[in-house]
Amino acid sequence: MKIVIIFLMTFILSQPSFAAMPHRHHQMSQEGPQEDYAFSGELKEGVREITVEAFRYGFKPDPIVIKFNEKVRLLASVTDVTHGLMISEFKINTPLRKGQPKKIEFIADKKGSFIIHCSVYCGTGHSRMHGRLIVK
Ligand code: CUA
């Protein structure tokens, strides 16, 4: 019995999700080779407009890919409960309530890969609700 428990503990502790704690709350800018994603959304009169959905527990699209120095407009909404869309490096933190889509505008003046956090408690998966913003 004891051996089984020790085995289980070793197994649990070796899992990547466990190893990743405490979770990263800051940017992963300049991390590794950048994957070759297509840009998200579409250009409308010089502004990249992207429809973003927040849900338990993630953001869609993921990643959101934009061009350096572009003007960006996120049309953000939720499909279930209230969430928050936060990208610290761009000083964005907007609560998203059901039935109340929000326009979030900013200029992509930093290159790299940034974590999108959910900033409103939305359930047991809240702290691991992340998305990614890639500026290239
Ligand atoms: Cu979604 Cu917290």
Image (tube, rainbow, N blue to C red):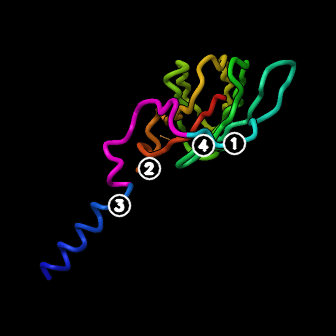
On whether ligand 1 comes within 8 Å of the CB at mark 1, the answer is: no
Sequence-earlier tag: 1 or 3: 3
Given the image, on which type of amino acid does mark 4 rest? Answer: Phe
Name the secondary structure under disc 3. loop
| Mark-to-mark CA distance, 1 and 4 | 20 Å
Horizontally, is 8 left or right of 48 in the view? left
Label 4 within 8 A of ligand 1 by Cβ: no
Residue in the image at 66% along x and 31% along y? 100
Q: Residues within 10 Å of mark 1 (few under 14, many from 20)?
A: few
Q: Earlier in the sequence, mark 1 or mark 4?
A: 1
In the picture of the structure, the residue carrying the numbered disc 4 is 59
Magenta segment range? 17-32
Q: Distance between the residues labelled 3 and 4?
A: 24 Å
Q: Nearer the viewer, residue 7 or 88?
A: 7
Residue 36 got which mark? 1
Mark 2–mark 4 Cα distance, whole angstroms, equals: 13 Å
Point out residue 90 in the picture as x, y percentages from the top left corner: 55, 20
Secondary structure mostly taken by the magenta-highlighted segment of the chain = loop
Helix, strand or loop at label 4? It is: strand
Say which residue label 2 marks: 125
**Residue 39 placement (x, y as % from top left):** 75, 35
Disc 1 from disc 3: Cα separation: 28 Å
Three-letter amino acid code at disc 3? Gln
Looking at the rendered structure, the kind of residue marked 2 is: Gly
| Residue 18 is one of the magenta-drawn residues | yes
Asked if the residues shown at circle 1 and circle 4 are in contact, with their CB atoms under 8 angstroms apart, the answer is no
Kindly report which numbered mark, 1 or 3, lies closer to the viewer in this rendering.
1
Mark 3 crowd level (few <14, some 14–19, many ≥20, 10 Å Cα): few
Q: How far apart are marks 2 and 1 (CA)?
A: 29 Å
Of the two numbered discs 2 and 1 on the same chain, state the one appearing first in sequence.
Answer: 1
